[in-house]
Image (cartoon, rainbow, N blue to C red):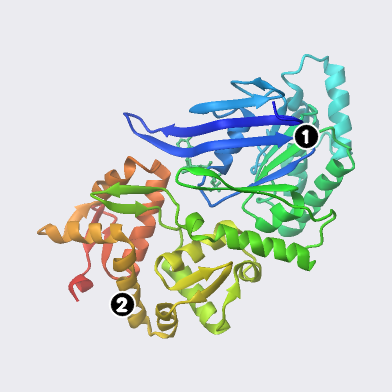
């Protein structure tokens, strides 16, 4: 065991079994040593496997191969030293605050009185004193997440695992809770040795964590592992802070991150997962960049739109995939095609969009070729979904088709007939 290691992951791989012989590899070659005293944030593009990694550490998701070691011992099943906080709070509405928190001790071999005493203590620590008998629906979102935290902390876990714990809260509430949790942790008011948090928020990661790993790729691996050496309490306006955020944005917008969505190959043509963003959002973003009229820091733009990277990156990815924008070193700028698009009339935009789609999204060509080969220029959507099914999960197939249809319709290439569940060629295809 490495010195001071609390948890070690050795050569961990995860593949999802999709039935039959089909598997989807999600994580590969994960080697990670998590030490006591660390606050680790896990960042990565949407769908890269961050939650899967967290659930593997929690022992809630089994690995396909590799070892997970806690305090020097390999474990299978639930990690005895870990407790989890979920984005959705996951409280039982019919139980009071006290009862919900006490649930965190359910599996512990201690007397009921002691359980109650421990629960009351942690309720006090997390700032919910006086709300012991309230029900979740009587509490604000922030207070509900405090209950979620209380339930996780009541068992004095060595490792607190948090899956986007603040993303369902409004900005101010999230800010308060982040600050309070950090204070509890730094002042050692909770005995938790290590916190591991999955987040989409680059700024949130830099604000809270001492170490950040970035997972990405196809399948995902740990591509960056860095220490955040800024002293607490961190000031988000401090240039050292903003530089760190900027640097992370640059890393995360590198080609290998934004273009490593799962790719499948059909007759030697690659099909990559298409960013989930509507043609309208892409258009608005390009217009905005045109008005800015200069290369701009991505993180400043995300800030300006008050967007999390989860919502912001797909827009950036969509415009770079279609070569309307170019990203270098964390800065984004319009390409000549992007400038043309932003200046064009509605009809010209559709033409430009069509041409970029045909050039840069191979699966669009496949759809068109198949529709053209049919005498009625129609084909059931299931046919296209089947092509994607072996390599994408059912939800992803759905999302993929929805976006392809939205983009195809905007470009007036093809459309979808809800009634017959068929894609059909628009007249303009041959224009
Ligand atoms: N139980 C499952 N069965 C099959 N596929 C799954 C399952 N759970 C997750 N996946 C797939 O595994 C991939 C990684 O999912 P995961 O939720 O770990 O990613 P993530 O990085 O946390 O995503 P997000 O940032 O969107 O929350 C996704 O493609 C997802 O659809």
Give the image location of residue 309, x and y in percent.
59, 59
Q: Residue at left 41%, top 70%?
A: 323
> Would you identify the image quadrant in which residue 425 lies?
bottom left
Tell me which label, 1 or 2, sits earlier in the chain: 1
User: Viewed as shown, does residue 318 lie left or right of 121?
Assistant: left
Q: Which residue is under mark 2?
A: 351
Q: Residue at left 67%, top 48%?
A: 212
On screen, residue 104 above or below 293:
above
On screen, residue 18 above or below 236:
above
Residue 370 is labelled as none
Give the image location of residue 278, x and y in percent.
44, 64
The reply to whether the residue tagged 1 has its Cβ within 8 angstroms of ligand 1 is no
Q: Residue at left 57%, top 57%?
A: 252
Q: Residue at left 64%, top 25%?
A: 69
Residue 36 is labelled as 1
The quadrant of the rendering that contains the N terminus is top right
Q: Label 1: state its secondary structure.
A: loop
On screen, residue 367 above or below 345:
above
Give the image location of residue 152, x and y in percent.
74, 33
User: Viewed as shown, does residue 65 lie left or right of 206?
Assistant: left
């Amino acid at each position: 065991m490495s010195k001071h290691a609390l948890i070690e992951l050795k050569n961990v791989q995860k593949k999802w079994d999709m039935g039959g012989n089909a598997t989807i590899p999600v994580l590969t070659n994960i080697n990670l040593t998590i030490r006591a005293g660390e606050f680790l944030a896990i960042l990565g593009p949407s769908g890269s496997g961050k939650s899967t990694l967290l659930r593997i550490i929690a022992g809630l998701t089994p690995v396909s191969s590799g070892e997970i070691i806690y305090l020097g011992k390999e474990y299978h099943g639930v990690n005895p030293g870990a407790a989890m906080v979920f984005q959705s709070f996951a409280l039982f509405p019919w139980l009071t605050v006290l009862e919900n928190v006490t649930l965190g001790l359910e599996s512990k071999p201690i007397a009921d009185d002691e359980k109650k005493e421990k629960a009351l203590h942690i309720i006090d620590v997390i700032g919910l004193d006086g709300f012991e008998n309230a029900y979740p629906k009587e509490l604000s979102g922030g207070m509900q997440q405090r209950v979620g935290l209380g339930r996780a902390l009541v068992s004095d876990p060595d490792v607190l695992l948090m899956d986007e714990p603040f993303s369902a809260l409004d900005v101010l509430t999230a800010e308060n809770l982040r600050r309070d949790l950090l204070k509890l942790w730094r002042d050692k008011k909770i005995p938790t040795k290590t916190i591991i948090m999955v987040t989409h928020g680059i700024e949130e990661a830099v604000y809270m964590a001492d170490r950040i790993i970035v997972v990405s790729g196809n399948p995902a691996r740990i591509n960056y592992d860095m220490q955040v050496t800024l002293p607490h309490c961190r000031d988000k306006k401090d240039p050292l802070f903003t530089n760190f955020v900027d640097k992370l944005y640059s890393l995360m917008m590198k080609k290998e991150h934004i273009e490593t969505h799962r790719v499948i190959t059909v007759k030697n043509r690659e099909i990559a997962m298409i960013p989930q963003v509507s043609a309208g959002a892409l258009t608005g973003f390009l217009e905005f960049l045109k008005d800015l009229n200069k290369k701009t820091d991505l993180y400043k733009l995300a800030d300006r739109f008050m967007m999390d990277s989860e919502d912001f990156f797909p827009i950036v990815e969509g415009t770079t995939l279609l070569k309307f924008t170019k990203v270098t070193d964390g800065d984004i700028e319009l390409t000549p095609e992007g400038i043309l698009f932003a200046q064009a009339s509605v009809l010209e935009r559709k033409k430009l969009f069509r041409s970029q789609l045909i050039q840069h999204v191979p699966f669009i060509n496949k759809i068109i070729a198949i529709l053209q080969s049919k005498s009625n220029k129609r084909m059931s959507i299931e046919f296209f979904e089947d092509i994607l099914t072996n390599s994408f999960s059912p939800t992803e197939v759905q999302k993929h088709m929805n976006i392809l249809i939205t983009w195809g319709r905007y470009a007036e290439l093809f459309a979808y007939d809800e009634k017959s569940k068929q894609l059909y060629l628009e007249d303009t295809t041959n224009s």
